[in-house]
Image: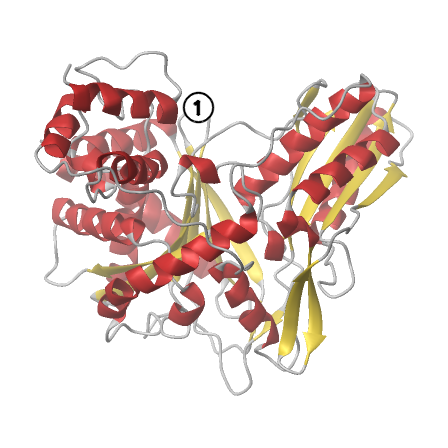
């Protein structure tokens, strides 16, 4: 291999956690995905001094192809970004502050929660110490919102101990106690915190029996995202095991602090603003008209769950791969097709969360790093499915390359996109070091009711949640405003999407 290829292979090994990368290796065959394609672009730009985007991996998945592309453009290695200080909030947090104070009745985004069932002796007091160490380690978890004349001001305090409680599940039999544990966990999942007074991190230990308990970990969404929840649980478990053995914490110093990450992303806001100004020029604020939408001044989550079977999902993945696309792109194309047919609209604005972790050093940061990535899809001219997938692919790649943007400035321009969440199946919540297993929790907090800003109605559209399952199927749900849509409308959307997912691969076949 050439020197460029050898250096690139080292980057692949670091990123994909594989022992060997051959000259004929394929990025996606080695386990790469769209998230890692973004990080690869950042590493290539930094190491070789060439401006690379995530489409490098998609257009040129082979190591030799990428090395040749880099060699043809190579310059001096780019210097590392200058350290940035200050700016302790992400754009999602900035938007949350605006969103919470918009209506006359303040809104609360609620918490993100995960649960695991631990099947051996568990010391709640020791876990409280361990979780406290994790809170002290991550500045985002010590962030508080204080009221002021403009709504809220935000401070990071030195000490904000987590709230940890223990309860006993009721019931005469193990089955009754487990059912009560589920009810208690669901109640904890939907309990709101006060971002002005309460700790941002809380945990509930539900005793089901001897050596049998459910741990529910909740962190206010203002200071965390889904990725961060896995970090908090894993680090708390590692510290717990060390304390139990009388050893010091095994956690290594953070590569990048949250405040520094946020300050760096602000430099990217300016760089990416021209792209988003161009993309959103003239964009519709909502999908309108939208048949079936009722007038509503309030919003509450409701969901219609459904499943796309493994065989259909497998064909969709294979067809996407054959066209240089990801499963997310294929699902987004299917959803776009359904929305276009239902509304008759040609200019469709969607939104999907992106991790915001564009470099490997960001992977260990706890905070609200998630980016709300707007996708404006052109459905004009009655495109066939292959053409629509190509348009979605280009839109996703471009948006991903510019994902670090000031979303709190973008949302007022497109406040009612149709959201789409696609999650690859990963390691379910567990407590490393103890025998544990996932404990199911509802995804949505359906007890929350949010008010629209004064004088406005809710113009939201149904949105789609898709989760890959270990057996290859897709667990999905159409999520909608319970005040704005009838359940039958959501059920019909689920049927239309399932049908479209089945038809899409046939037209994409070579």
Q: Which is nearer the eye, 359 or 120?
A: 359
When the figure is inspected, residue 379 is found, relative to residue 165, above or below; the finding is below
Q: Quadrant of residue 231?
A: top right
Which residue corresponds to the image point at 64% horizontal and 27% vertical from the top-left? 430
Q: How many marks are shown on the rendered structure?
A: 1
The x and y percentages for residue 457 are 49, 80
Mark 1 Cα-neighbour bin, 10 Å: few <14, some 14–19, many ≥20: few
Q: Which is nearer the eye, 356 or 85?
A: 85
Q: Secondary structure at mark 1?
A: loop
Q: Is 232 displayed left or right of 334 in the figure? A: right
**Residue 112 seen in this snapshot:** no
Q: Quadrant of residue 327?
A: top left
Which residue corresponds to the image point at 28% horizontal and 32% vertical from the top-left? 317
Residue occupying the far bottom of the picture: 455
Which residue corresponds to the image point at 64% horizontal and 37% vertical from the top-left? 232
Q: Is 130 displayed left or right of 453 in the figure? A: right
Name the quarter where the N terminus is drawn. Answer: top left
Q: Is 313 displayed left or right of 69 in the figure? A: right
Name the quarter where the C terminus is drawn. Answer: top left
Which residue corresponds to the image point at 55% horizontal and 85% vertical from the top-left? 454
When the figure is inspected, residue 145 is found, relative to residue 502, above or below; the finding is below
Residue occupying the far right of the picture: 172
**Residue 323 seen in this snapshot:** yes
The x and y percentages for residue 108 are 64, 65
Residue located beneath label 1 in the image: 471
Q: Quadrant of residue 64?
A: top left
The x and y percentages for residue 166 are 87, 39
When the figure is inspected, residue 494 is found, relative to residue 174, above or below; the finding is below
Q: Which is nearer the eye, 182 or 65?
A: 65
């Amino acid at each position: 291999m050439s020197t460029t290829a050898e250096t690139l292979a080292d980057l692949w090994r670091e990123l994909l956690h594989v022992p060997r990368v051959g000259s004929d290796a394929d990025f996606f065959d080695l386990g790469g995905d769209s998230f890692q394609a973004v990080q690869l672009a950042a590493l290539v730009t930094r190491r070789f001094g060439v401006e690379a985007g995530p489409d490098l991996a998609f257009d040129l998945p082979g190591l030799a192809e990428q090395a040749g592309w880099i060699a043809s453009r190579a310059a001096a290695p780019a210097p590392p970004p200058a350290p940035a200080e200050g700016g302790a909030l992400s754009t999602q947090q900035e938007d949350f502050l605006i969103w919470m104070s918009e209506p006359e009745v303040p809104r609360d985004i609620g918490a993100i929660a995960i649960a695991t069932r631990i099947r051996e002796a568990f010391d709640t007091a020791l876990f409280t110490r361990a979780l406290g160490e994790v809170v002290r380690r991550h500045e985002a978890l010590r962030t508080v919102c204080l009221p002021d004349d403009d709504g809220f001001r935000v401070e990071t305090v030195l000490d904000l101990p987590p709230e940890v409680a223990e309860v006993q599940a009721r019931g005469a039999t193990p089955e009754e106690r487990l059912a009560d544990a589920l009810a208690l966990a669901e109640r904890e999942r939907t309990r709101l915190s006060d971002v002005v007074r309460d700790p941002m991190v809380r945990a509930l230990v539900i005793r089901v029996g001897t050596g049998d308990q459910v741990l529910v970990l909740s962190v206010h969404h203002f200071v965390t995202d889904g990725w961060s929840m896995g970090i908090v649980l894993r680090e708390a478990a590692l510290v717990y095991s060390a304390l139990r053995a009388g050893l010091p914490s095994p956690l290594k110093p953070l590569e990048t602090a949250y405040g520094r990450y946020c300050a760096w992303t602000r430099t990217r806001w300016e760089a990416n603003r021209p792209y988003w100004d161009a993309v959103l020029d003239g964009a519709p604020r909502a999908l309108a008209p939208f048949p079936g939408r009722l007038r509503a001044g309030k919003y509450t989550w409701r969901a219609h769950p459904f499943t796309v079977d493994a065989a259909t999902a497998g064909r969709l993945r294979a067809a996407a791969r054959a066209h240089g696309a990801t499963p997310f792109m294929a699902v987004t194309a299917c959803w776009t097709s359904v929305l276009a047919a239902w509304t008759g609209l040609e200019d469709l604005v969607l939104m999907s969360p992106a991790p915001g972790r564009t470099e490997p050093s960001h992977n260990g940061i706890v905070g609200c790093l998630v980016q709300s990535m707007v996708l404006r899809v052109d459905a004009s001219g009655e495109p066939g499915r292959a053409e629509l997938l190509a348009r979605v692919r280009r839109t996703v790649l471009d948006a991903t390359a510019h994902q670090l943007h000031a979303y709190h400035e973008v949302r007022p321009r497109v406040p009612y996109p149709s959201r789409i969440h696609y999650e690859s199946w990963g390691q379910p919540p567990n407590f490393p070091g103890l025998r544990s297993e996932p404990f199911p929790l509802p995804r949505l907090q359906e007890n929350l009711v949010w008010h629209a800003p004064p004088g406005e109605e809710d113009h939201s559209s149904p949105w789609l949640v898709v989760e890959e399952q270990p057996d290859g199927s897709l667990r999905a749900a159409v999520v909608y405003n319970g005040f704005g849509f009838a359940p039958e409308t959501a059920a019909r959307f689920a049927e239309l999407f399932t049908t479209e997912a089945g038809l899409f691969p046939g037209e994409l076949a070579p």
